[in-house]
Amino acid sequence: MAPSARRPWRRRGLLAAAVGVVALAGVVGGSALWVRTAASGRVYDVAAAPPRDVALVLGAGLRADGTPTPYLAARLDLARDLYARGTVQVVLVSGDNRTEAYDEPTAMRRYLLAAGVPADRVVADFAGLDTYDSCYRAAEIFGVHSVIVVSQSYHVPRALAVCRALGLDAVAVGDDTGRTSPPTWTAGEQREILAAVKAAWDVLSQRTPILGPRESSVATVLSHQHR
């Protein structure tokens, strides 16, 4: 094929690539805008957080010995403080328990009980495999309506966007102690770029996570509290 004949195909290839880049940028930018807008004015520190029924603590990994990682422990400490202040009445710990050998919710519950939170005020969700699943199940399985989402500060905007899209009256408290380890913190911030795209897709596609029977434990505590 003569060089002049190849040029139109080359131009078309470059045009297609350019269109793809623009489309990808639009998806990433649109997802980021959605997250920022949904979270605007809804992230607080512990002292300023408005009352909500439930603190939703999202899983963040376990150490080799089965105890919470520093990031997860920091989230749990915030939830303990929210309960101690009377800002929330129940702590819902939501994490991964896909295998017998890995049980985030039980480790989270044990941590809070050791920190002084009463056993009947800590409820475990064993199928919170990601942020979307945790928010979805909080509403559909545990009947939660108002919630303070607890996570690292770079993560809470996305968690808020998802929970609010799923109908929860949600605000958030974010932990910043992880900033003392800049490489890990920066990696978490960078991960949020694509995680926001996935979250937007989950919401738009109305993905249904693992469900199961409805749980009444949160409602039981709240009904006693409101008498």
Image: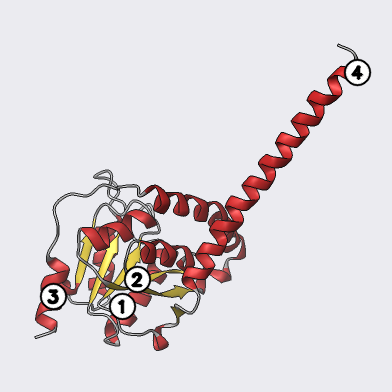
Q: Secondary structure at mark 1?
A: helix
Residue 107 as seen in the image, left or right of residue 201: left
Residue 118 as seen in the image, left or right of residue 163: left
Residue 102 as seen in the image, left or right of residue 171: left
Q: Which residue is mark 4?
A: 3
Nearer mark to the viewer, of 4 and 2: 4
First in sequence: mark 4 or mark 2? 4
Can see residue 124? yes
Q: How far from the left and from the top, in percent, is residue 110?
A: 24, 66
Q: Quadrant of the N terminus?
A: top right
Nearer mark to the viewer, of 3 and 1: 3
Amino acid, disc 3: Val
Q: How far from the left and from the top, in percent, is residue 113?
A: 22, 72
Q: Which residue is mark 1?
A: 80
Nearer mark to the viewer, of 2 and 3: 3
Proximity of marks 4 and 2: CB atoms separated by less than 8 Å: no
Can see residue 187? no
For the residues marked 2 and 3, what is the alpha-carbon distance in whole angstroms? Answer: 20 Å
Proximity of marks 4 and 3: CB atoms separated by less than 8 Å: no
Residue 162 as seen in the image, left or right of residue 66: right
First in sequence: mark 2 or mark 3? 2
Q: Which residue is mark 3?
A: 221
Q: Toward the viewer: 224 or 2?
A: 2
Nearer mark to the viewer, of 4 and 3: 4
Proximity of marks 3 and 1: CB atoms separated by less than 8 Å: no
Q: Which residue is mark 2?
A: 76
Q: Residue furthest top?
A: 1
First in sequence: mark 1 or mark 4? 4
CA neighbours of label 2 inside 10 A, class few (<14), some (14 to 19), many (20+): many
For the residues marked 1 and 2, what is the alpha-carbon distance in whole angstroms? Answer: 6 Å
Amino acid, disc 4: Pro
